[in-house]
Every structure is written in structure tokens, then in C-alpha cells.
Image (spheres, rainbow, N blue to C red):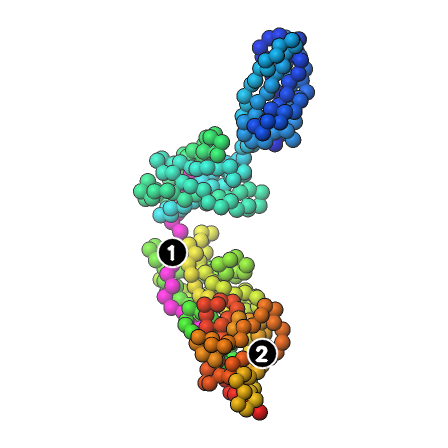
Amino acid sequence: MIAGRDNSLTIEGGAAACVEDIALARISGTTEPLKWAALPDGRITATIPKAQIAAGQINLLIRQQGIADVDTIALTALTETGRIDAFTLHAGDLHGALTGTRLDTVASLSVDGAVFSPGAVVRTGKADERVMTVEAPAPVTGWAAGQDRSGRVTLKDGRVLPVAVHVAPARPSVTLIDKTIAPAAHAASLPITLPSSTVMPLDASLTFSLRGAGATRFSGREQVEIATVDGRASTVIAAANGYRVQSAQVAIATIEPAKALGVSAYGPLRYRLLQDGVESDWAPLITLVRLPTLTGVTCDKGAPRCLLTGDALYLLAAVGGDAQFTGGAAIPDGYTASTVAIPRPTDTLFLKLRDDNSVVATAKPNVADR
């Protein structure tokens, strides 16, 4: 039987005229009567509505007139099988894409001795796609581009379905050579310094270079995709908007994240090359943080605390007068004021950023006593 649909059963065994009633028994112990009818040839038909069937074991209870014992027929309700279309793996990869429908029911895939385990299911249009990763790499290392193979998909309920397997050309491969951050100019504000080149302000510009690895060569027609790791924002850099080629082995890309990803983008960024309809693996690029605008620090003469003024101070998690944030000011969520009380600074303000608490930026305040 198939769970989620009406099922009609035909029961053979003779003496249909002696049957008093038929019921469905669940593992929980509950029973529900079924509609049934005796056929002229001595068989019985019964219908189990889809609302009464869940995947798993169920029993039919058949009671005959004048007999105390109940006949039991054990049945298994299976999840409805989806469609298995194909499995594609790029030469050199340890994972591939299984396509079809109802791929959440897939338990494993085997191809010529290689066993693949399932990852997350992604809905693409009217079909599903599920990443399948090989458990031991040895069986797939010799697979060459252009090969077609046959595989077997095992479902969670034990059923096995055939699947066509295709080995696609190897993915493009690139490595990061160098990157340069060009900060934006802010008049009448305190410059904020970030601790390393692994972090950049949202309003800065980033130029980075890539080297083609293995057989990967650049023509200028490929593109570079950049996205936040959490998937909230992404963009594609092409020849028309910042991608250019130094040589067949080296390419250069430039991005202004605030324009390309939006003014609310932040967090780790990653990149990949798009070439001839095939993507390279994602690789880390840089971490993006949003910075407030700081305009000054005002102190009452001799007072231990001062007022920091600026805009978008909610982008700060804390402000301190030393690297340990001794007596520092914690900035609450949703802070909208343009001033905040902070410890009297000496020559440096220490800023813990809301977008990444592990990042501590600094600023040189021009303290005004009043």
C-alpha cells in the first residue's frame, strides 16, 4: 500500500459470506472500521481512505460470524515513490547532484562500488536536487569526464530504484592570489581602523586577483560570483562590471559591496568562478562589517566619562578606553541616539563591532573638554 492515497484491497480465502466486519488496526492500538463488500466469486474488496494511512506497519482485522478469534493480515504502507531523474558528478569531485522528486526519501546511492550519502534537499523549479557525497573516495578517483554509468538508489523504506549516472567535465579551479581594500573617504568623521586585511568595511572597495589551477584558463567571458556565506546577498562580477583578465592564468575582480550586495550586507563573503555553465567550489574571500560614523568625543573637565557622538551607533556592540574594555559602554540592540556615554579615552577608542564581536576596531578621538 502507498501512504497518502486511497488504497483498494482484494482479499482471497473463501467464505466471504461469513465475514462480519473488517477493521484497520494501528500500532497505537486504535481500530477503525473499513468499508468492504463480498464479490460473487468469494473474494472481498475493501477500501482504506488516504486519511487513515501513514507510512509503516498496519494490520487488517477480519471478524467472522460465530467465531471469537479474529484473523489478522499484516500490511506495510510505503511512502509514495518520487521520480529519480539522474545523478551527475564532475570528474575529480567527491560529491554530485541527484535530481528528481521526493528526494527526501533517499537513503543512499551506490555506483560501481562507490556509496554516496545524502545531504540537504534543494527545491529547483518543479524538481528537487540533493547533494550526494561519496563515503570513501577511492572508487571514484578513476572516473573520467564523459563516462556514463548505472547506479542504484536505495530509499528509506528499503526499495531500490535505478538511476542514470553521468560524469561531467572537471569543475574550474581557482586560488586567491592577493586582495586590496580601498577605504571610502568620510569628511568630518573619525577614521576607524580595522585590525586586519581579513575584514573590510561595507562602504570600501575590494580588488582581488585569482589564479587558474590545473587546466583552468581565463578568457574574459567567465564570471565571479560573490555571496554572503548565509546566502542573504549575492552578486556576479562580469566584464561589464569589474572583471578583467591579466593573462590566461590570472584574473582581477573589483567589487563595491555596498552597491553590489546592499547596505544591510555583512558577515563572511565567499567567491566562486562561473565558466561555461559550471561553477568552481566556493572559497572564503573576506569578512564584511558595517561601521558607524563617529564625529567626536566631548568631555566635562576632569569627568571620568565622556559623550561619543556619531551616526548609526547601533552598529557598535561596545566602546572602551582600553583593549580590555574596562568600564566600557555596552550599546543595546536598536540604539538610535546620536550620543553615548563612554569611558574617558586616552589616545585610542576601542570599538567592538555588532556585525562580528570578535572584531575590535580602533579610532583616534579628538577629545574636546568643556
> How far is disc 2 from disc 1 in space, using C-alphas?
49 Å
Which is more N-terminal, label 1 or label 2?
A: 1
Q: Secondary structure at mark 2?
A: strand
Please name the residue that numbered disc 2 is placed on.
340
Residue 271 falls in image quadrant:
bottom left
The nearer-to-camera label among 2 and 1 is 2
What residue range appears in magenta? 164-182
Name which residue lies at 59% across and 31% down: 54
Q: Do residues under tags 2 and 1 come within 8 Å of each other at their CB atoms? A: no
For residue 173, the mark is 1
> For the residue marked with disc 1, what is the amino acid?
Ser
Front residue (pair 341, 84): 341
For residue 209, the mark is none
The verdict on residue 176 being magenta is yes
Residue 137 falls left or right of residue 330: left
> For the residue marked with disc 2, what is the amino acid?
Val
Give the overall secondary structure of the magenta segment: strand
User: Residue 129, how many percent across, how many down?
Assistant: 50, 44
Residue 301 falls in image quadrant:
bottom right
